[in-house]
Amino acid sequence: MTPEKIKELMQDCTLCPRRCHADRLSGSKGFCGQSAGITAARAALHFWEEPCISGSCGSGAVFFSGCSLQCVFCQNREIALGKAGRPISIDRLSEIFLELQEKGAANINLVTAGHFLPQVCLALHKAKGQGLTLPIVYNSSGYEEVSSLKLLEGLADIYLPDLKYHSPRLSARYSHAPDYFQKASAAIAEMFRQTGPPVLTPRSALMKRGTIVRHLLLPGETADSKRILRYLHDTYQNDIYVSILNQYTPPTGSPDLPEELRRCVSPEEYEKVLAFADAIGIEQGYIQEGGTADESFLPAFDFSGL
């Protein structure tokens, strides 16, 4: 990735499936809410990812501002909408990666970085040239273009995408993206092509390479969750990890939130989906226990580490 290639990609942006063609280089903002300059809200050790990502030392998470999906129930709305963020240069981003390594991070965790992917790739190349050796985690909504993911080949070691919806009706209603499953399933196939089956470090049980697909249950939508789990297991068997989440929390300050999303997922709904996952043979996975539907998983977006 070169500065010239970054300029080319930013002048007519088609990095994500929105393909909005914004001239972000001239200051226009894409669907993601961002122009060409990198903005981020936090860079710090993060302890609330899956155990093989966070471990006991924490994942070196960089939370980027903006998002190409914009779900109505987003828990990170202040950064997804671009309301929280600090400009950082490519050189500064590469320094941040190295600083997180010095702090003992298990990996570098790029959280919602797709709309800055060319710049992030250049920063990774710079950091690797200066001694960065940690695995690189690409943490994503799953709504990605395969052509953009190919920029990460040889750079990303671990993919951590969501697979939010199977139904185009749901993805249209909640994320204005009726093509979500089509795009996300193709993106996950590319991610798996790049990483192959999971590889963990024996002593620490930290993932060195592989793909973990997250699925967040939504209230009243156990049938869609089952379709997603069936698809993932039929397609990948146990060559990927599947993380089944029950932490959905109705966001505050979201007046357009549909009525059916104004409650948490019930224990009965979650147990029904877990029983289904077990029945179809999903073995490589994570589940959540207890009352996780709160904001304890959200760090303070206070520009720490930037």
Image (cartoon, helix red, strand yellow):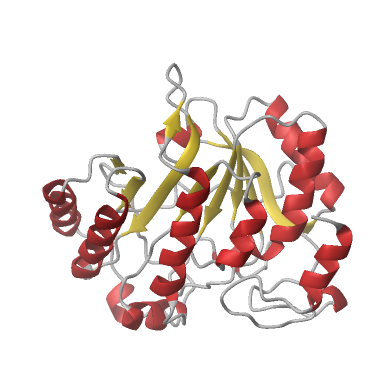
Of 236 and 42, which appears nearest the observer? 236
Looking at the rendered image, the quarter that the N terminus falls into is bottom right
Looking at the rendered image, the quarter that the C terminus falls into is top right
Q: Residue at x 71, y 43 (%)?
A: 304
Is residue 95 visible to the viewer in this orientation of the structure? no
Look at the picture and state if 237 lies above or below 83. above
The percent position of residue 248, horizontal first and vertical second, equals: 35, 59
Q: Residue at x 23, y 40 (%)?
A: 283
The percent position of residue 88, horizontal first and vertical second, equals: 81, 54
Of 84 and 228, which appears nearest the observer? 228
The percent position of residue 252, horizontal first and vertical second, equals: 45, 68
Q: Return the residue found at the far top.
A: 203
Left or right, residue 174 beside residue 110: left
Look at the picture and state if 142 lies above or below 295. below
Q: Residue at x 85, y 56 (%)?
A: 2
Res. 81 image quadrant? bottom right
Look at the picture and state if 32 lies above or below 106. below
Is residue 68 visible to the viewer in this orientation of the structure? yes
Left or right, residue 117 beside residue 256: right
Look at the picture and state if 35 lies above or below 129. below
Number of numbered callouts drawn: 0
Q: Residue at x 78, y 72 (%)?
A: 10
Left or right, residue 269 beside residue 258: left
The percent position of residue 284, horizontal first and vertical second, equals: 29, 39
Left or right, residue 67 beside residue 246: right
